[in-house]
Image (cartoon, grey):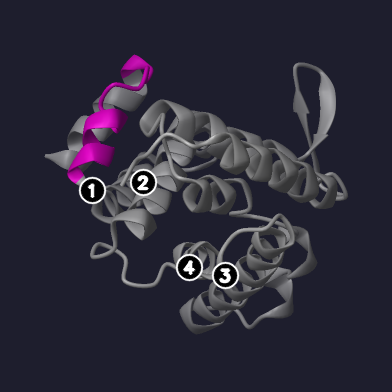
Amino acid sequence: MTSRMDTQSESQLSQAITLIDEINQQDPNKVLIDDVSTPVALIYGQRMAKVLSDFIPDAPLALSIACRAQHIKRWTILRADYPMGRTGYLTWRKDLGAMHADLAMDVAKSVGCNELEIASVGKMIRKEQLKREPLVQALEDVACLVFLTYYLTPFCEKHTPEKIISIVQKTWKKMSDAGHEAALKLPFTPAQTQLLTKALS
């Protein structure tokens, strides 16, 4: 899966990051990062890129673009605009994935990616053939690792232990063996470690 980028690919990725971040900078939803108000979609893309660099240091161009654009312009499709319940939730998630994929493919095309790379970006973000396609699974692993690294703690502050165990179990099922290995190396708190042990037992 991995192959070190050549100079052209590195230049394309740099251009893609600029384009994606310019869009995500417009997110009206903000979070405090080191006391600085930061757009939610922007910091998410940066976190995806950081985890990818640790998980797959020599990630190919298409995967790198897909990770950065995983939540591109996410704030424009609201959960509140869909019916309550699982069907509404799944429809919302599908529509989000389609939008993210289309925008990310546009970015990939604009920076000169070839047709195979452009299609791959869309396939990854739409999660097509998850568990069967290595690049699609790699993106899912990165997203799960981002959740466990950056969002598990605030999630734990808002939900019951039973809910936390349930979400960890669901997250774990989405991940590959390599993802599991990386997750087990994360610096969880003692309380989180106890919940993880229960979830995975």
Determine if the magenta segment contains residue 183.
yes
The mark closer to the camera, 4 or 1, is 4
Tell me if mark 2 has few (under 14), some (14-19) or many (20+) residues whose alpha carbon lies within 10 angstroms of its own.
many
- Location of residue 158 in the rendering, given as x and y in whole percent from the top left corner: 55, 40
Residue drawn where x is 37% and y is 32% of the image = 55
Q: Is residue 88 left or right of residue 167?
A: right
Crowd band around label 1 with a 10 angstrom C-alpha radius: few (<14), some (14–19), many (20+):
some
Q: Which mark is residue 97?
A: 3
Q: Residues within 10 Å of mark 4 (few under 14, many from 20)?
A: few
How far apart are the two marked residues, 4 and 1, measured between alpha carbons?
24 Å
| Element type where label 3 sits in the image | helix
Distance, label 2 to label 4, CA atoms, is 22 Å
| Image position, residue 28 (x, y; %) | 87, 50
The foreground one among 108 and 35 is 108
* Horizontal side of residue 153 vs 65, given as left or right: left
Q: Quadrant of residue 192?
A: top left
Q: CA distance from mark 1 to mark 2?
A: 7 Å
Q: Which residue is mark 2?
A: 141
Which stretch appears magenta?
A: 177-190
Q: Earlier in the sequence, mark 4 or mark 3?
A: 3
Q: Nearer the viewer, residue 134 or 94?
A: 134
- What residue sits 61% from the left and 77% below the top? 95
